[in-house]
Image (cartoon, rainbow, N blue to C red):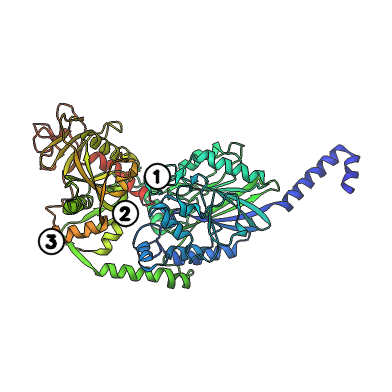
Amino acid sequence: MKMLRLFKRTALLAGSLSLLSWLTASSAQAFTLTVLHNNDGESQLTPDGDEAGAARFVTLINSLQNSATTDAVITLSSGDNFLAGTAFDASLDDGIFYDAIVLNAIGYDAIALGNHDFDFGPDLLAEFITSPQFTNPVPYLSANLDFSGEPALQALFELGPIDASALTNNVISESAIIDKGGEKIGVVSAITEELASISSPRGVEIEPVLAAVQAEIDQLEAQGINKIILISHLQSINNELDLVPQLSGVDIVIAGGGDELLADAAGTLLPSDQAQLDAFLNDTDGDPETNPNPVFGDYPIASAVSQNGQVVPVVTTPGNYQYIGRLEVEFNDQGVVTSFNGEPVRVLAQDPNTSPDPFVQANAVEPVLENEAELAQNVIGQTDVTLDGTRALVRTQQTNFGNLIADSLLWQGQQLADEFGVDSPQVGLQNGGGIRNDVVIPAGSDITELDTFTALPFPNFVSVIPDVGAALFKAVLENAVSQVEDVAGRYAQVAGFTLGLDLTAAPGSRVIDVTLDDGTPIVFNAQVVAGAPAVDVATIDFLARGGDDYPFTGLDFTSVGVSYQQALANYIQQELGGTVTAEAYLVDSDRVVATMFDPDESLSSGGDGGMDGDMDGGMDGGSDPASVPEPGTVLGLIATGAIAVLKRRTA
């Protein structure tokens, strides 16, 4: 009543008091929220160099949860919560999901589904979500997936938005409402539309991201929820930045799948990242390929504006439990973000102030370390040459480790062809994305079972695809080299033939020469040779099913019952006699040659498959070697800039 009387006295005084009243009410009703987040933990449970591992991560994030000074704290994952490898292999062997122990200890309020969560198929994902290692119920979210074709996942699905506080067990939904500090927070999730081509969702249908996310936001707003967070796994933060201007009603976006490093303050980076940043800042040449900037942008990125005109903070972290994102946000009484700030919190491997969580260390980390120790003790061979499985290289050019793996698929397919009643394959293909963890085995080293599991961790099985026509085989190879610039996982390591490429050409027109090892030409001068025979292909079942957009979909194939990891071990022991020689696996072989294409000078013109044998990149028939790039030069230039980027990982 006092305020009403003041309004009657003078308009000026009324206006002044109205402003004061609004400011007081706004301050009184403001709500502050700390968002703790990470993404792409990917089963990196054990310490490795700068990576502190999951036990220290749990200690630190629990400390941040308890020490936050805002009105409430919410903890979120943006996907890829486990990954094939030695840790997950230990889980499968022991019947205990060690990653679930870690996720439960972190105390997530919601978890996004990422592409790697589907790598073992829908049934195992359902088993993981319902594992008894989860004692604190948590919703797994994705708005753009239809699980009706997969009974095990559909049985866990509840139509969103769900009330997370009412959960008695883990469920899957499109979105969740989470009570925090007396306020209701809406959380929506989405996964990349490329899921079917990069993982194994089987009967799970993928729907467009934009429409699905906006529909879920609209439902939340219809229920009076005015604070909404999107946790997405779209493979690159650029995709989230492109999405925000098309959305209305979203307040915060937490991206996953790209592993970008965001930072805007000194002293917040892991030592290796700081050293790389220092090299970039001190690079007098200014050459981004020599010393690239490891930092993608500020934390948070504040350049994205939603369709309703609101600045939306966008954040992410590098994976492998290296960083915890900490974003503090203030909302007014209408749910509008009025301020935000934050930083990535590094998880130091040798931090005297952060000891490993004892429960996680004993029940998740130690069992994995024991499994790895057993694998490391099983020596299957030796190598006389350094075997290079560097991530950026196996995705952009041939490497001798890639050659070895492709050879093992071809050999294993040939060994078992009769037993499985299939034609003996002539060629082998392994996608670079299936070769993991930057494995490099130095010359003179033992090759252990651990090395093979680390490099080839997925549940991929050697398969033979019969009678692949010459035109289709060219299309397969065109797909394999169509995204070299993006360092995509579809790049093929090859066996049984030589391959000539023109990487200056447009995707779809890059394969200029294919010659089988017996001298049979398949492609000459970028054209399929008339009358060229069909080939039988040894590969992994992931590619045989059309993964990475390989155009094998619909073709019959036969799995020969041996995993690609087992094939590599068998090949080294049985075919190579336990020794990988430098002569057989040259660091710079001529199995694949990338050149500037001259239609008058095919790589096949010399009659030996187009490779002149002296590794100078020159063509037979009198070309000037000085005018032609070295084998792999174009790819090498691409890879040089990509190596540092891929230290932050690309899926």
Does the rendering let one see residue 541? yes
Whole-angstrom CA distance, mark 3 to mark 1, is: 39 Å
Image x and y of residue 554, in percent: 32, 40
The residue labelled by disc 2 is 436
Of labels 1 and 2, the one closer to you: 1
Q: Residues within 10 Å of mark 1 (few under 14, many from 20)?
A: many
Helix, strand or loop under label 2:
loop
- Residue 423 place in picture, x, y as percent: 17, 46
What element does badge 3 sit on?
loop
**Amino acid on which disc 3 is placed:** Gly
Q: Dot 3 corresponds to which residue?
A: 577
- The label nearer to you, 3 versus 1, is 1
Whether tag 3 and tag 2 are in contact, CB under 8 A, the answer is no
Q: Residue furthest front?
A: 421
Decide if residue 274 is on the left or right side of residue 404. Answer: right
Residue at the spot 48% in from the left edge and 70% down from the top edge: 357
Whole-angstrom CA distance, mark 1 to mark 2, is: 20 Å
**Badge 1 vs badge 2, beta-carbon distance below 8 Å:** no
Q: Is residue 368 left or right of residue 556?
A: right
The residue nearer to you, when weighing 546 against 591, is 546
Badge 3: how crowded within 10 Å, few (<14), some, or many (20+)?
few
Identify the mark nearer the N-term, 3 or 1: 1
Residue type for callout 1: Ala
Indicate the position of residue 398 as horizontal and vertical percent values: 23, 46
Q: Earlier in the sequence, mark 3 or mark 2?
A: 2
What mark, if any, has residue 306 been given in the picture? none
Residue 162, given in percent of the width and then of the height, sits at: 60, 52
Q: Amino acid at mark 2?
A: Arg
Name the residue beneath numbered marker 1.
196
> Nearest the camera: 157 or 120?
157
For the residue carrying disc 2, how many other residues have a C-alpha within 10 Å: few (<14), some (14-19), or many (20+)? some
